[in-house]
Amino acid sequence: MINIDYNFNNEQVILAGVSGGADSMVLLDLLHKKELEIGFKLICVHVNHNIRGKESLNDQKLVEDFCKKNNIAFKLYNVFCLEEQKKTKETLEEVARRMRYNCFFEAFSEFKADYLFLAHHKNDQAETILMNIIRGTGVSGAIGIKKSEKIIRPLIEYTKNELIDYAKTNNIKFCLDQTNLDNDYTRNYIRNVIIPDIENINPNFINNLCSFSDKLLDDENYFSAILPYKLVKFNQKNKEIYISNDIFKYRKPIIVRLVKYCLNNFDWSKDIFNVHYDKICELKDFKSGTIINLPHSINVIKSYDKIIITKNSISKVNNEVAFKIGKTKYNNKTITIERCNQSEVDFNLNSKFADYDKIPADAVFRTRKNGDIFTKIGSGTVKLSDYLIDKKIPQRERDNLILLASGKNILWICGVEISSNIIIDSSTENFIKLSYLLKS
């Protein structure tokens, strides 16, 4: 006997995503019976993808007629997946799913709903698991359809045949989607070819695969509880993730799961497979500055003390701006040069203090160039690149450091240090304070 066992109450607003297929029509029937029994507000949400022409309209009419007959609130969304696919170049499956869920989220907002019920069943779960394993998504993919607080799938323990039997027994009309027979789609091929072939070997395959998934979920819950989340920092403003290099003290299963957790936080995990996680784990053996390029323009960068995951591309600024007293804006930063008295000099501040008369007339603000040199206070002149390495400035930041330069001589590395060539000494008469802000 198929039944929905859920903690309903009469104050809830429940959405049901209904396509018109056997599984979703069974879901709608079961929820309607619960609505009559308990008194919550049920709203049927139907998304017409406009892919199959007249057949799509027939599906819509069947769902709408069922709702009218049973006095169920009905909400229709029309989306045009074929047109959208031409724009995005995604597969039709991806476009349809994304647009369908966008409609569901819109319904959540419009009706101030508590939950969305969907009709995924055990066969769907098995297909998802196999598809993810084939794509190489690893353990998390082999778990299949994830549980959600707001999206409820009460039929996940029932097979497709059980739902069809319920529909026939209870005289529930449903539609047959002819596109489900097209084996050019990956899921359809798995559903119509791979699973039946395996069932010839073991008729209980679907139950066994879903049981395997449940065991994996238990393992994943355990790993999630012990991950070293303290090693992670999220920069929500700049959309960057920082993971301490201490992560490499752990074994690969922990590293991979922590990186997945980080990517999921920014919804960046799409199309990231085991081969990518393997490369990230190998960063332990590479020097600072090594970059791994992931799909969708995601970069993973090995820095001195951390791993940086970002989508930001930093383009080098090549223009030069003349040195002057006052405020200068350069590469989204504000540099401030102020005259001051000797009594105001305080080397404990983040700002630097210099001798104004030692700054050449040709001094400019710019980014670094080949051949730049820097004279360290008290220890001679070195290549700028060597100095930045010694100071452990991450490689990805070096090209965009703001420099005060006279020819190849670097007088001030903004935010880092000034050159011995412009320091204050006993002969200094004109004092200046140099400071800058990261954002203008």
Image (cartoon, rainbow, N blue to C red):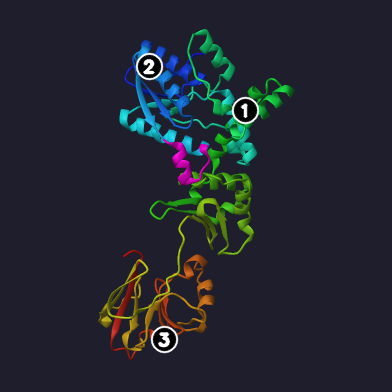
Pinpoint residue 420: horizontal percent, then vertical percent. 43, 84
Q: Mark 2 or mark 1, which is nearer the start of the sequence?
A: 2
Determine which residue is flagged by label 3. 421
Q: Amino acid at mark 1?
A: Arg
Q: Main secondary structure of the magenta part?
A: helix
Q: Amino acid at mark 3?
A: Asn
The residue positioned 34% from the left and 88% from the top of the image is 361
Pick out the residue farthest to the bottom: 427
Decide whether residue 81 is among the magenta residues.
yes
Q: Which residues are magenta?
A: 80-92
How far apart marks 1 and 3 lie (CA) works out to 74 Å
How many numbered dots are placed on residues in this image? 3
> On the rendered image, what quadrant is the C terminus found in?
bottom left
The picture quadrant where one finds residue 345 is bottom left
For label 3, count other residues whose C-alpha is less than 10 Å away and answer few (under 14), some (14-19) or many (20+). Answer: some
Determine which residue is flagged by label 1. 191
How far apart marks 2 and 3 lie (CA) works out to 83 Å
Pinpoint residue 74: horizontal percent, then vertical percent. 35, 22
For label 2, count other residues whose C-alpha is less than 10 Å away and answer few (under 14), some (14-19) or many (20+). Answer: some
Determine which residue is flagged by label 2. 67
Q: Mark 3 or mark 1, which is nearer the start of the sequence?
A: 1
Tell me the element at label 2. Answer: helix
The residue positioned 42% from the left and 16% from the top of the image is 31
The residue positioned 53% from the left and 44% from the top of the image is 270
Tell me the element at label 1. Answer: helix
Decide whether residue 182 is among the magenta residues.
no
